[in-house]
């Protein structure tokens, strides 16, 4: 009995952990130096894509924000300025902050897997692609007066007058908005009950609220481009 206890105590477990310093930090520091040197050489041979000097007497047409803000500028076509410039960016920032708390699934940490992340990966990639699609459209495909031009079309001031935009009536707009979110919350509860149980009430509400807002943003762009719908809800105080 004593020998078996001593044998148990003598078992050694293999430790595969390493210290952050210097194992990781040194590699990151060297990688940062190589990237900096590469950028210096690149900037020496390639000029920055700057425009002409600003002329106060002649406004630029189109006046575009830097490419990383072009997506926000493109959203002004489809949404009210307060919503496109304040609400949506705030939702994106808050959603990214909440992401580690909403998605606490440990599978996929340290290795690549799609089988065990069938919900998280498509949702994140869809949001990523949609945002950079807006950036691409605002940067490359918007010409004078923010008119849409295909890549093979030449920018010109001679373009057809756009069709008039329409707004939904207030009762219809409220019904569409409430129906969209109600169906979005209810359908997963009926079809994917395990998904709801794994998240719980609070995490499910936050996850679906963020997801439906992202889908609704793309849906509103679709309504604007296909049906010339400007706003879903129009009131004397706010447009949505």
Image: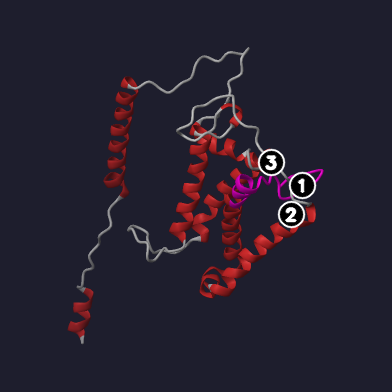
Image-based side of 37 in relation to 68, left or right: left
Q: CA separation, marks 1 and 3?
A: 10 Å
Residue 173's disc is: 2
Residue 205, position in %: x, y? 61, 63
State the count of labels.
3
Measured along the vertical axis of the image, is residue 160 above or below residue 188? above
Magenta part of the protein: which range?
219-240
Residue pointed to by mark 3: 80
In the picture shown, does residue 114 fall above or below 143? below
Q: Are marks 1 and 2 in contact (CB under 8 Å)?
A: yes
Q: Which picture quadrant has residue 106?
A: bottom left
The CA span between labels 1 and 2 is 8 Å
- Counting from the top left corner in percent of width and height, residue 172 is at 76, 56
- Disc 1 crowd, CA 10 A, few/some/many (<14, 14-19, 20+): some
Per the image, label 2 sits on a secondary structure element best described as helix
Relative to 103, residue 34 above or below: above
Q: Earlier in the sequence, mark 2 or mark 3?
A: 3
The answer to whether residue 171 is magenta is: no
Name the residue beneath numbered marker 1.
234
Q: 131 or 201: which is nearer to us?
A: 131
Q: Position of residue 165 (x, y in %)?
A: 70, 42
Which residue is at 79% across, 52% downward? 170
Reading the chain from its start, which is encountered first: label 1 or label 3? 3
Q: If the image is split into quadrants, where does the N terminus sit?
A: bottom left
């Amino acid at each position: 009995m004593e020998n078996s206890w001593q044998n148990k105590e003598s078992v050694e477990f293999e430790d595969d952990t390493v210290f952050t310093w210097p194992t990781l930090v040194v590699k990151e520091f060297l990688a940062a130096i190589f990237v900096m040197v590469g950028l210096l050489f690149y900037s020496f041979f390639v000029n920055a894509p700057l425009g002409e000097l600003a002329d106060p007497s002649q406004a630029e047409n189109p006046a575009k924000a830097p490419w990383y803000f072009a997506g926000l500028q493109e959203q002004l076509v489809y949404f009210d300025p307060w919503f496109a410039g304040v609400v949506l960016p705030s939702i994106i920032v808050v959603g990214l902050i909440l992401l580690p708390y909403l998605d606490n699934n440990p599978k996929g940490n340290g290795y690549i897997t799609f089988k065990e992340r069938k919900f998280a990966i498509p949702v994140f990639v869809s949001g990523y692609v949609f945002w950079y699609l807006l950036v691409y459209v605002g940067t490359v495909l918007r010409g004078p007066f923010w008119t849409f031009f295909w890549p093979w079309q030449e920018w010109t001031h001679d373009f057809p007058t756009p069709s008039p935009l329409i707004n939904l009536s207030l009762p219809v707009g409220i019904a569409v908005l409430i129906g969209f979110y109600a169906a979005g919350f209810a359908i997963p509860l009926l079809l994917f009950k395990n998904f709801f149980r794994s998240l719980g009430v609070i995490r499910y509400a936050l996850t679906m609220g963020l997801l439906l807002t992202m889908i609704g943003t793309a849906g509103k762009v679709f309504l604007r481009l296909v049906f010339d719908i400007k706003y879903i809800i129009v009131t004397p105080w706010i447009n949505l």
